[in-house]
Image (tube, helix red, strand yellow):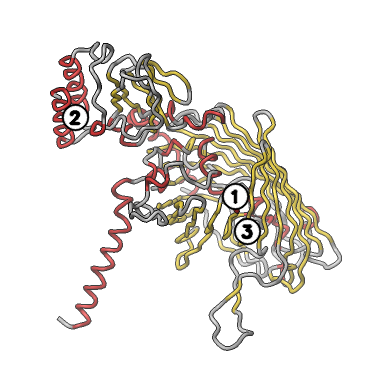
Amino acid sequence: MSSFDVKFRTWTLSLVFMLFQLLWPFTAEAMPVFARKYSMSCVACHAAFPRLNQFGEHFAANNMRLPNWREKTVETGDDRLALPASTPLAIRAQAYAQARRGKSIDPVSGDTEQSSSDFQSPYLVKLLSSAPLSEHITYYFYGIFAEKGTNGETVIEDAWFRHDDVFGSGVGMQLGQFQISDLMFARETRMPFQDYMVYRMAGITYDRGLLFDRGFGKIDLGLGVVNGNGIDENFNINSPGYRRPDKMFDNNSDKSVFGRIGTEIGPASLGLFGLAGEQANATGPAGLDSGNRDTDKRIVGLDVSGDVQGKTYWYGQLLWNSWDGFLDKDEDYNWWGGFLGADYIPSDLWAFSALYNYADADDLSNTDTIYEGIDINSLSLTASYYFMRNVKGIAEVNIDFLGKDDQEGTYYTGHLTKEDYILFGFDAAF
Amino acid sequence: MPASTALSGLLAGIIASFHVTNGYAEELKIQRIRIESTPGGAAVSTIVGKRGVTPLSITERDIYPNTYPDAKVDLYGKVVVSKPGCETITRRVTLDDIKNGLDFQLDCTASTPVADSKAVGQLQAIPKPEKTATSIAEPLSERRLRQLKVLDELFEDKLISAEEERAIRKRIFERVNQ
């Protein structure tokens, strides 16, 4: 046997062993990380996976730990070491088959690709991890493999450390990558396949930054600052000299600041959100390119939510956006949008959801840019059937109430095709 | 046949099959937890209130309700077992408890409440009960018979392995003989 064969076999065996190590906790217990850690059922935190119940919200706000978290660590005899007793990993996987009317249209050339049906399997595979590391510090991250069918890349979305009592002040501080919109409604815990579209359109999903939070009796306050340019970019720091290792994620000194103040009024939770920051202007054909001008971006939001006896959860969001000088330097562009939804969970087997998305491009209409496409007016109806607590089949239909726009101007922008779809598939976490 | 029509048909078929399998799934839907105590007749309560007296079965949602008064959050995921003249035991329920059931041995020599005791409900760590008027209300032979009957049920229902069954059976005899 050649030395190459020996090395190959050694590496293969090592790899198999590592995979076995990695997969063992899942095959043995088949529960997500927190349920596994605390030996609790999924129903402790979820009214119906992934919708959090009251205790699930409490758990998340409590730095994602129970008071007995230390019991679930390795007994090392070192009080200053709290290693999780098992590798805190979990997986979420989704696979769908879909029939839809939407097309892929190149905004510049108008070239069109269309498929009336699509097997979106896998839709995504996520690897998640979280654990308390000290009395006050918890980490959380997940990476997505094959996001929405895009093979060949792995995306880290949430990835942060959180200290829940900075200098004994009762202030929580989260540093890392997170969604600004998580201050209102977490997209990951929504029941429908359809997204909370206005969050994506307003650009308040993933970013890197700091988030502080504190409760004052019935008032919850969250204040944050982020780079303001998402999570896709980074830049070499090359001015100190040749082949320096560091990079930076932000491309300017401006930061976006945001905050939310929330309270409960009767059975409803109410929140007021605000953001002030900068974004690069849009330029080029159909507004597809980022320009060199930093333009002001301001958002005001109102969110409201509640539940009826833990069986029906309802929620609503409105966002008013002001993008000054975003296209033309001297023009202000205002638009608004929101969503309204409800989840009805009549039993441990079934859940039914409705999600209405609305946005009006308003000042961005008729600009011959892709931002005309902010328009949306759709209703998604979803039925979820739970084979197990952590495995569900879903069926969803999306009804697009908008008419189809005729192509006008130079570019192929706006609502040129309808967005109706029907899908079914599986969603599992283990 | 257009693909969208085919997919719609398939979707309808899947939903229909969910209904067909409903009978099987109904059996899965509610996890019940068996709770016993020695002496019997102890009151069992959870975050949603009083559930009855031992022996009884409660559901997961009795322990993990979707909503509850904020002031009661400390009781979330726990059962409280109490009986006049005996200690009150509060225990956080684990998945093993849901699978194997809970068997509380109440100490009726003192009525001091025990907060969140890990030991209680785990047979290997059950404190030896004193022979007080209350604890001997049920003769030892009857108690042993009852425990063995429950053990047989658990084993027949494949909720415990043969090895676990032997170990618990051994402990039941050891405890009674002490």
In-front residue for pair A336/B118: B118
Measuring 78% from the left and 62% from the top, which residue is drawn there? A296
Query: Can residue B13 be seen?
Result: no
Tell me which label, 3 or 1, sits earlier in the chain: 1
In-front residue for pair B178/B54: B178
| Labels 2, 1: front one | 1
Measure the C-alpha gap from mark 3 to mark 2: 54 Å
Q: Tell me where residue A374 sits by quadrant.
A: bottom right
Residue A105: image x %, image y %? 62, 63
Residue A398: image x %, image y %? 58, 44
The reply to whether label 2 and label 1 mark residues of one chain is no
Amino acid identity at mark 3:
Leu
Residue furthest out toward the front: B110
| Labels 3, 2: front one | 3
Q: Which residue is mark 3?
A: A210
Q: Which mark, residue B155?
A: 2
Residue A123: image x %, image y %? 46, 55
Amino acid identity at mark 2:
Phe
Measure the C-alpha gap from mark 3 to mark 1: 18 Å
Q: Chain of mark 2?
A: B
Give the secondary structure at mark 1.
Answer: helix
Q: Which residue is mark 1?
A: A168
Measuring 37% from the left and 56% from the top, which residue is drawn there? A78
Amino acid identity at mark 1:
Gly
Query: In what quadrant of the picture does the C terminus of chain B appear?
Result: top left
Compared with residue B71, is residue B136 higher up or lower down, i.e. above or below? above
